[in-house]
Amino acid sequence: MKKIICLFCLVLSLFAEETLEISAKKFFSDDKNGITRIQGDVHIKKSKDTLEADQVVIYTDKDRKPISYEAEGNVKFHIFMQDGREIKGHSDRLIYESKTGEYRLLENAVLKEVGKENTIRGEEIVVNNENGYANVLGSDSKPAKFIFNLDDVSVSKKPSSAKSSRSSKNKSDTSPEEIQKDKNTQDMLSDPSKTIIPPQGNQ
């Protein structure tokens, strides 16, 4: 039989409060240290946002207001961005910071925008609800980093300035390397999953 726990005064911003509804098989609370541990088919709902996992640990402040959440095992979530877009994702672990509205998906992370083909993968994906962006990191064996704006792609090194300077050149003045670089940039913009910036150590 699942237990239903309602925690009030979840601070989403300096002045906003919402009700947090949690269902799970086991519930342990350590008020002295501000730790609440929830285990077994955990389902958390905050407004329209949902989080599912095998285990979730909630850290609270002295006023019992949630500071952060750490979910482990079969983590899935569905959030509604402030601009109205829906984001779904899953990973082995997830950390949510209440104050910043930031989600960190860790290990085998996948993020998808509902209603679009945009899907990104990495060992760590950081989603910011306020700013509406996702920062994606690869593993040590395949280091990669890019910014996915949930609407279009903005890589760390924006090619716009370089592209505009080359537009004044004649085609005959453009080297084969520059032509290939332009093609690679267009490929990344058309397919966000290919948007990968190599390690910066060689620059």
Image (cartoon, rainbow, N blue to C red):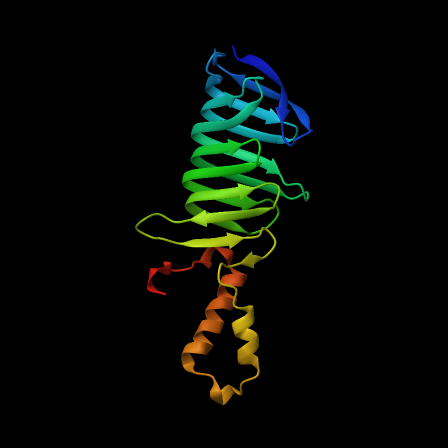
Q: Is residue 44 left or right of residue 107?
A: right
Q: Quadrant of the C terminus?
A: bottom left
Q: Is residue 184 above or below residue 82?
A: below
Relative depth, front residue between 165 and 37: 165
Residue found 62% across the figure and 42% down from its top = 130
Outermost residue, left side: 141
Total number of numbered discs in the rendering: 0
In the image, residue 22 lies at what x, y percent? Answer: 56, 19
Q: Is residue 52 above or below residue 140?
A: above
Relative depth, front residue between 131 and 193: 131
Residue found 54% across the figure and 21% down from its top = 61
In the image, residue 100 lies at what x, y percent? Answer: 57, 36
Q: Is residue 2 left or right of residue 175?
A: right
Q: Is residue 100 left or right of residue 124?
A: right
Relative depth, front residue between 78 and 159: 159
Q: Is residue 94 above or below residue 163?
A: above
Task: Locate residue 23: give its quadrant.
Answer: top right
In the image, residue 34 lies at what x, y percent? Answer: 49, 17
Outermost residue, top side: 1
Residue found 48% across the figure and 87% down from its top = 173
Relative depth, front residue between 31 and 133: 31
Residue found 52% across the figure and 68% down from its top = 159
Q: Is residue 113 left or right of residue 199?
A: right
Outermost residue, front side: 62
